[in-house]
Amino acid sequence: MTDVVHLTCPVVDSLQLRSLRAGMAVRLSGTLLTARDAAHARLHQLLQASQALPVNLENQALYYVGPAPAAPGLVVGAAGPTTASRMDPYTPELLAQGLKVTIGKGYRSAAVVSAMVRHQAVYLGAIGGIGALLSRTIKNARVLAFEDLGPEAIYELVVEDFPALVLVDTTGQDYYQIGQDSYRRRR
């Protein structure tokens, strides 16, 4: 494994973003936004109605998570990723709003990968099943929009050294595909 790349969010260094390659380990620090299915549906409705979004997505990183309630002494409870493909119908239009990083688990559709290349964005994978460990990287959390959605509201999370892996880079290279191709060659 190569060295870990430290990435500050929101992403203002587009050269650094474009230097990331599928398979690279990253550590995120700074601010992440969160959104899951219900929040994505509302953002889509606002865009379809030509209304302003309640958050500015320009250069932002969006983590597909609904943080659990905080245990004593913690900012949030478990904060593990949800399956990214559920957000695929909405992702291209959010990338067109300036979104630069999405974080989840699992595959992305060809349409999303194409939109990532077009908008020079990346998809990062967070490890599922370790939500309690990931929550330790969260230093502050506050609701920004859609508070009525509870854990599925849009939060702003301040993170420090949040671990992730580049799954799709700005050139469209897909780490899942790279792994499958490597496996096929060895058989």
Image (cartoon, rainbow, N blue to C red):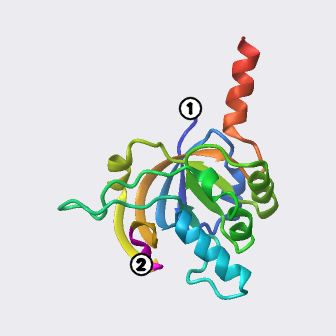
Can you give x and y, in whole percent of width and height, for residue 4 in the image?
53, 43
Q: In front: mark 1 or mark 2? A: 2
Residue to which mark 1 is pinned: 1
Quadrant in the picture for residue 101: bottom right
Q: The residue tagged with tag 2: helix, strand or loop?
A: helix
Q: Is residue 72 visible?
A: yes
> Would residue 85 appear left or right of 146 to someone viewing this image?
right
Q: Amino acid at mark 1?
A: Met
Q: The residue tagged with tag 1: helix, strand or loop?
A: loop
Q: Is residue 57 visible?
A: no
Q: Main secondary structure of the magenta part?
A: helix
From what the image shows, is residue 183 above or below residue 134? above
Can you give x and y, in whole percent of width and height, for residue 6 in the image?
52, 53
- Residue 67 vs residue 141, the one in the foreground: 67
Sequence-first disc among 1 and 2: 1
**Callout 1 crowding tier (Cα within 10 Å): few <14, some 14–19, many ≥20:** few
Seen from this angle, which residue lies furthest top? 187
Q: Residue at x 76, y 52 (%)?
A: 113
**Callout 2 crowding tier (Cα within 10 Å): few <14, some 14–19, many ≥20:** few
Can you give x and y, in whole percent of width and height, for residue 106 in the image?
59, 43
Whether the magenta-drawn stretch holds residue 183 is answered as no
> Would residue 23 appear left or right of 116 to someone viewing this image?
left
Residue to which mark 2 is pinned: 148
Which contiguous range is marked in magenta? Answer: 145-150
Seen from this angle, which residue lies furthest left? 72
Q: Residue at x 67, y 49 (%)?
A: 20
